[in-house]
Amino acid sequence: MAIHKESRKLNYSPQQLFDIVADVQRYPEFLPLWQEVHVSKLPRASSEDYSYSTRQTIQLGPVKKCFCTETRLLPFNRIHIQSSDPLFQTFTMNWLFIPDNNNQCIIEFSLNCVASSLFLRPVFDAVLLQMAHSIVSAFENRARFIYGKPNTLRE
């Protein structure tokens, strides 16, 4: 079972970080493992939150796996991603964006993933936990690429 939780203060606004995490179609540009992403927009439930479905392809060495997720976004506060795809027994990913002073943001990230296949489970656990440890850094690097280096030093 791959479970990872992380909290980090970043010198970007919640909106900037939210926009990067919500832009799933760009993941193959900067996230390891992600090869392809196809998004199906769902009608907006309200002006405050909305959802979309995603079909993603990840590559673990020579093995490519496709899976589907449902993403619920509460702009600029929270993103909840879950999958009922047969590839997983459990798959949830959560992002919280907590505003701080001086246009900073505390990110709380969690990933809970269990592969359905007993054969794939050890591989998923090893690879996804390794990837989870670097995922927040990948998004921070993406923010630096898009918005430039923040003016204040990181705590």
Image: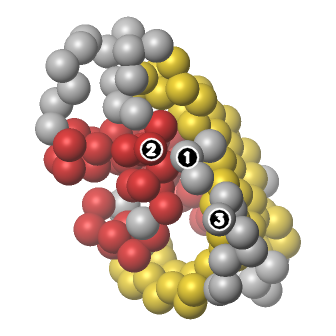
Callout 3 secondary element: loop
Residue at the (48%, 49%) spot, across then down: 18
Locate residue 69: give its quadrant. Answer: bottom right
According to the picture, the residue beneath numbered tag 3 turns out to be 47
Residue type for callout 3: Ser
Residue at the (21%, 26%) spot, across then down: 150
Colour pattern of the rendering: secondary structure
Q: Is residue 93 left or right of residue 9?
A: right
Q: CA distance from mark 3 to mark 2?
A: 16 Å
Mark 3 or mark 2: whose residue is earlier in sequence: 2
Q: Is residue 59 visible?
A: no
* Residues marked 3 and 2 touching at CB (< 8 Å): no
According to the picture, the residue beneath numbered tag 1 turns out to be 76
Residue type for callout 2: Gln
Mark 3 or mark 1: whose residue is earlier in sequence: 3
Q: Position of residue 139 (x, y in %)?
A: 38, 47
* Residues marked 3 and 1 touching at CB (< 8 Å): no
According to the picture, the residue beneath numbered tag 2 turns out to be 15
Callout 2 secondary element: helix
Q: Is residue 92 left or right of residue 23?
A: right
Mark 2 or mark 1: whose residue is earlier in sequence: 2
Q: Could you classify mark 2 by the number of other residues whose Cα lies within 10 Å: few (under 14), some (14-19), or many (20 or more)?
A: some
Residue at the (47%, 37%) spot, across then down: 14
Locate residue 92: give its quadrant. Answer: bottom right
Q: Nearer the viewer, mark 3 or mark 2?
A: 3
Q: Is residue 52 left or right of residue 132?
A: right
Q: Is residue 137 visible?
A: yes
In the displayed structure, 37 sits above or below 149; it is below
Locate residue 29: give its quadrant. Answer: bottom left
